[in-house]
């Protein structure tokens, strides 16, 4: 990965080492790391558990105070989990006196720095940083040495419809292997309106599952497929300014959100939008009509 922020706090931040019962540590509300089913059986996990049993926990997790004499985890989720698997009751922690926003930055930075980061985890980490910086994309970009456009692109992926997110995680039961898609694939999906994303997913499950969509398709192939799957409005046999289709919910075709030229990022220029606008609803007319 490129330059990433260090998981550190400002010099004036107060912190101290203390042994506490691990059961008092609550999950971080800003945690974006996903632990897949069976992670406890992974070789790296077993090695860490064995090391903790033999030598103890050398790098204490970071925590902050929570109500009822408990603590919120800031950083060190895997170390905490492995300590519990190793049978440790009391573990060393570093208690930091930080605000929730400061804690969010540390948690997001720790996750962002991981080498095995998945696309969905990286997107979620960026979203946490945006929230921690009160939506200031420029500040987030400066913090992680990225452009504003780069940050906004990842933020859109973080907000992709949940039905698509489920396909972003490695799962041997997925016959299409969409988890193999790269960032570029998911940017194409994320740029679409949420309603269109949902309808696209329904069409994928009904028609394209195991046929058109697969993990080996390139970004260019996906972009071409999405464009060809929409009906050209130039083929319509009605006046776009007055016609109200079955899916337009009282709006004319010209006003309908199901027009591709109303979907940000689908086309690169205003000229192409006007020339190549397509209908995303098969309830008005089917692709074969064109």
Image: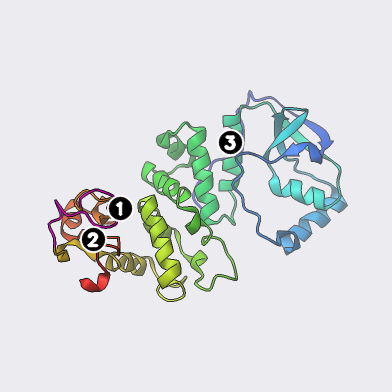
Q: Is residue 182 above or below residue 87?
A: below
Q: Secondary structure at mark 2?
A: strand
Q: How many marks?
A: 3
Q: Secondary structure at mark 1?
A: loop
Q: Residue 107: within the magenta?
A: no
The quadrant in which residue 147 appears is top left
- The x, y position of residue 141, in whole percent, is 43, 40
Q: Is residue 185 above or below residue 29?
A: below
> What stretch of residues is rendered in magenta?
238-252
Q: Is residue 188 left or right of residue 76?
A: left
The structure residue drawn at horizontal position 48% and vertical position 58%, both measured from the top left corner, is 164
> Which callout, 1 or 3, points at the residue further toward the start of the chain?
3
- The x, y position of residue 108, in whole percent, is 57, 42
Asked whether 191 or 80 is in front, the reply is 191
The residue beneath circle 3 is 104
CB atoms of marks 1 and 2 within 8 Å = no
Spatial CA span between label 1 and label 3: 30 Å
Circle number at residue 278: 2
The quadrant in which residue 183 appears is bottom left
Circle number at residue 265: 1
Q: Is residue 178 left or right of residue 222?
A: right
Q: Is residue 271 left or right of residue 23?
A: left
- The x, y position of residue 254, in whole percent, is 19, 51
Can residue 198 be seen by looking at this rendering? yes
Can residue 187 be seen by looking at this rendering? no
């Amino acid at each position: 990965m490129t330059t990433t922020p260090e998981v550190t706090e400002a010099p004036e931040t107060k912190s101290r080492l203390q042994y506490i019962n691990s059961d008092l540590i609550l999950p971080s509300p800003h945690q974006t790391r996903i632990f897949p089913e069976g992670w406890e059986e992974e070789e790296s996990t077993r090695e860490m558990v064995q090391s903790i049993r033999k030598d103890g926990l050398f790098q204490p997790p970071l925590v902050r105070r929570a109500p009822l004499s408990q603590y919120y985890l800031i950083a060190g989720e895997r170390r905490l989990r492995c300590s519990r698997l190793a049978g440790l009751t009391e573990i060393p922690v570093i208690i930091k006196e930080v605000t929730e926003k400061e804690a969010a930055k540390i948690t997001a930075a720790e996750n962002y720095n991981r080498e095995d980061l998945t696309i969905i985890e990286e997107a979620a980490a960026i979203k946490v940083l945006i929230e921690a910086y009160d939506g200031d994309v420029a500040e987030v970009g400066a913090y992680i040495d990225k452009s504003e456009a780069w940050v906004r692109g990842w933020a859109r992926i973080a907000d992709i419809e949940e039905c698509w997110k489920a396909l972003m995680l490695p799962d041997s039961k997925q016959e299409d292997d969409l988890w193999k898609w790269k960032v570029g694939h998911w940017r194409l999906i994320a740029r679409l309106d949420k309603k269109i994303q949902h309808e696209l997913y329904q069409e994928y499950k009904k028609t394209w599952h195991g046929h058109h969509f697969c993990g080996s398709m390139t970004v260019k192939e996906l972009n071409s497929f999405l464009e060809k799957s929409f009906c050209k409005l130039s083929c319509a046999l009605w006046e776009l300014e007055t016609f109200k289709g079955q899916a337009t919910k009282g709006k004319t075709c010209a006003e309908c959100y199901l027009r591709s030229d109303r979907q940000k990022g689908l086309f690169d220029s205003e000229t192409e939008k006007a020339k190549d606008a397509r209908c995303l609803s098969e309830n008005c007319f089917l692709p074969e009509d064109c």
